[in-house]
Image: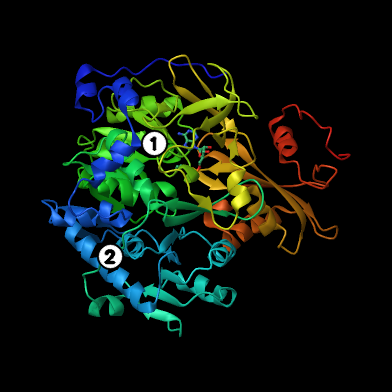
Amino acid sequence: MLQVSKRIKKTERQKQSANLTDYEQTYRSFSWKDAEKDLAKEASYILNAAHIAVDRHAQTFRKNKIALYYEGENGEKEKYTFLELSELSSKFANTLHTIGIDKGERVFIFLPRIPELYIAFLGILKIGAIAGTLFSAFQEKALIDRLSNSQTKIIVTDAKLFPRVSHILKDLPHLKKVILVERGAKNVPKHPKLLYYSKIMEKISSECKVRQMKKDDPSFILYTSGTTGKPKGVIHRHLAIVQEHVTAKWVLDLKEDDIYWCTADPGWVTGIAYGILGSWSNGVAAVVFGGRFDPSTWYKIIQDYKVTIWYTAPTAIRMLMAASDVSKKYDLSNLRHLCSVGEPLNPEAVVWGQKVLGLPFHDTWWQTELGAICIANYPCMDIKPGSMGKPVPGVTAAIVDDKGNELGHHKEGNLALRPTFPSLMKSIWRRPNKYKSYFVNGWYMSGDRAFRDKDGYYWFIGRADDVIKTSGERVGPFEVESTLVEHPSVVEAGVIGKPDALRGEIIKAFIVLKSDVKPTDALKNELSLFVKKHLAGHANPREVEFIDKLPKTRSGKIMRRVLKAKELGLPIGDTSTLEEY
Ligand code: WT7
């Protein structure tokens, strides 16, 4: 069991300046109904997440406040006020309306982190359509799975990514149009399905009637991976913004004068819930950096924009730790609160923050399916480095056995939540049974193993299934395996997450080759690149091993846990279902 390390104690001043000062009191008196009423008390209130996030601020003193500071990968800079974001997204909404897109239809955004991504997302929500986001690292196989399953009507992309889309158009019979963001592209592609962003936005009105939604109406869809099968479409509803709003306020501690930087891409739920909805609904100025990770560039962003609140991920923090000296060259003194999410945050990373940046990282825990932070270290709470913190007010968590019976303190079990908070997914797109399978004895089962200590802090142990977390990205082993078997040299593939000090886990593939194929290092490399090229940049196996036979159950299912045990030199465990190996 995890050692409970020394606490990082908060001073009285730190506790009092935090948005949430008396955790215990708030926990007792909290109700989601009140939180909802609080957001709804404005005269102009419309239940629509885009209105709550941005439009309502355009009618107040925040109208001319900068909502978005954008810096592109080549250093190009732009600013957008709340009013500008509101008007541009209304234009986009009107465009969709003109094309004939209606409530509930899917519109997917396949863009790098540029302002048009944010504008399009808000515009889609305004007409009541369902916004889907796709990482720009996705390749054709990943795109087909998501775009055809969701029967998307529109794809918004740019000139650089369009070739990947154009190759799969024949597989997307429901697609009406592709909106292409030109953004100074030298060679603007031509195709009968294309509409050009700058042209459509030029002529259309910036006023639109934002659609009043019902609480359960879907707002966005995000595909995420499980152990088996294709990625599944997690559907979130408009009401989720209530939880995104209050957690952004209390956990991230967003206040009027903050400059906030969430490093997550909106292809990931964090980049939506805290890069668009919950952050802007608090009226905060947000920084979006479109470039790649690099220690100097990241520190420069914090310095140049005087970032005060920073929400990032453990792999990035560990990469910064490896380049600790670089931090000394930059003025990072405006930082006042740091948070992390996505994978286990090791105690060393929390302590490094305290030592080098003068502030500890506050871990937060949640999942794509949960839509908003559910367990966290609050600004006012002492931190136990290595712990994910405590449930947020309004969320009831427990450690339960496989039948959903609660376990006591310090007992390892399944981390489970009562499904009574507004940001919990509403459904899994066209897979009602999959949705039902998450619930056992009235608990939402997260798939994570954890324990709770006597003070109520939760400690992460690992996944209960084979889902891989590499650099914070969730990757399904089945997706990687089914890509690998498409390679002409491969008969079978078994894929696992192998512990890695920097990336949390790396993807390792065990491959059975066709009998006439030579097992060379060059082939290992080729297989890794094959996944990168056909599935996604981040899903490539960094390690490939050739093997004569894969361990399988008698019914033919690959037993990844046996591969993992073998890799780590651990006992194989129960092998009663294993065929002869
Ligand atoms: C899985 C969910 C919600 C944005 C994050 C990614 C792991 C998440 C933590 C944490 C240890 C964590 C879990 C979880 N995870 N946060 N603080 N400590 N593990 O969402 O891609 O759906 O992944 O990420 O295993 O189940 P996601």
Tell me: residue 311, above or below residue 402: below
Work out whether mark 1 precedes mark 2 in sequence or the reverse, and give the earlier one: 2
Q: Is residue 183 left or right of residue 108?
A: left
Q: Within 10 Å of the Cα at label 2, are there few (<14), some (14-19), or many (20+) other Cα atoms?
A: many
In percent of width and height, residue 381 lies at 32, 22
- Residue nearest the viewer, comparing 398 with 314: 398
Query: Is residue 155 placed above or below 382 in the rendered structure?
Result: below
In front here: 265 or 32? 32
Q: Contact, CB < 8 Å: mark 1 with mark 2?
A: no
Q: Which of marks 1 and 2 is in front?
A: 2
Q: In which quarter of the image is residue 133?
A: bottom left
Element type at mark 1: strand
From the top left corner, tell me how far across and down residue 527 is, in percent.
Answer: 67, 57
154 lies above or below 139 = below
Q: Residue 89 carries which label?
A: 2
Residue 293 visible within the image:
no
Count of marks, rendered view: 2
| Image x and y of residue 165, in percent | 50, 72
Direction left: furthest residue: 61
Task: Classify residue 196 by image quadrant.
Answer: bottom left
Q: Residue at x 41, y 56 (%)?
A: 217
As drawn, is 7 to the left or to the right of 225? Answer: left
The colour mode here is rainbow
Is the distance from the Cβ of mark 1 to the nearest ligand 1 atom less than 8 Å? yes
Residue at position x 47%, y 14% from top?
454
Q: Which amino acid does label 1 sit on?
A: Ser
Residue at image mark 1? 340
